[in-house]
Amino acid sequence: MTTHTDETTTVEYAPEQPARLDWAKHAPEVYKAMVRLEIAARQGLDHKLYELVKIRASQINHCAFCIDMHTKDTLAAGESVERILQLSAWDESRHFYTAKEIAALELTEAVTVLTDGFVPDEVYENAAKHFEEAELAQLIAAITAINAWNRFGVTCRMAPGHYQPGQYK
């Protein structure tokens, strides 16, 4: 049980669940390959857009560890709290984002969810209007990479709350 005390009250929080597996320790070559993929995928992308995409995919995938990490990194990079908070409802708060960011968020959701088994043509075409082909390829790689990281985080139950901005850079 974790407790939090402020000036007037003490609140007991639910206990933190332990990680199931330190996958990076037991599969170090896979971890190293994922880090190389991450470094390669972010090349040529605007850093703030890249982080917004990672947060949004992590929200969809319920990866608390990645939400914690990328929110902290994004705040440290100067992104506004308001834009980060609105990400979970970006479609209803489009006025916080550029047309290019909206196209990236639409593509992120389509690639992450894949409920219909494909990315809709209109989503892809909108992204293609806002990104040159090389940049679009990088964006698709970045979305794919964060989805892979999310699957490790969720499956192994990596605990949020301990990450410090820039810790893994």
Image (spheres, rainbow, N blue to C red):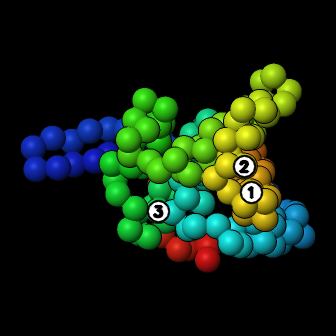
Mark 2: few, some, or many residues within 10 Å (few <14, many ≥20)?
A: some
Say left or right for 43 vs 29. left
Q: Which numbered disc covers residue 136? A: 1
**First-in-chain label (1 vs 2):** 2
Residues at marks 3 and 2, CA–CA distance in whole angstroms: 25 Å
- Locate the C terminus by quadrant: bottom right
Secondary structure beneath label 3: helix
Q: Is residue 165 above or below residue 128?
A: below
Mark toward the viewer: 3 or 2: 2
Q: Residue at x 81, y 22 (%)?
A: 116
Distance Cα–Cα, label 1 vs label 2: 7 Å
Label 1 to label 3, Cα distance in Å? Answer: 21 Å
Question: Which element is circle 1 on?
Answer: helix
On screen, residue 9 above or below 32: above
Q: Quadrant of the N terminus?
A: top left
Residue drawn at point x = 78 percent, y = 71 percent: 40
The residue that label 2 is drawn on is 128
Tag in front: 1 or 3: 1
Label 3 crowd bin: few (<14), some (14–19), many (20+), radius 10 Å: many
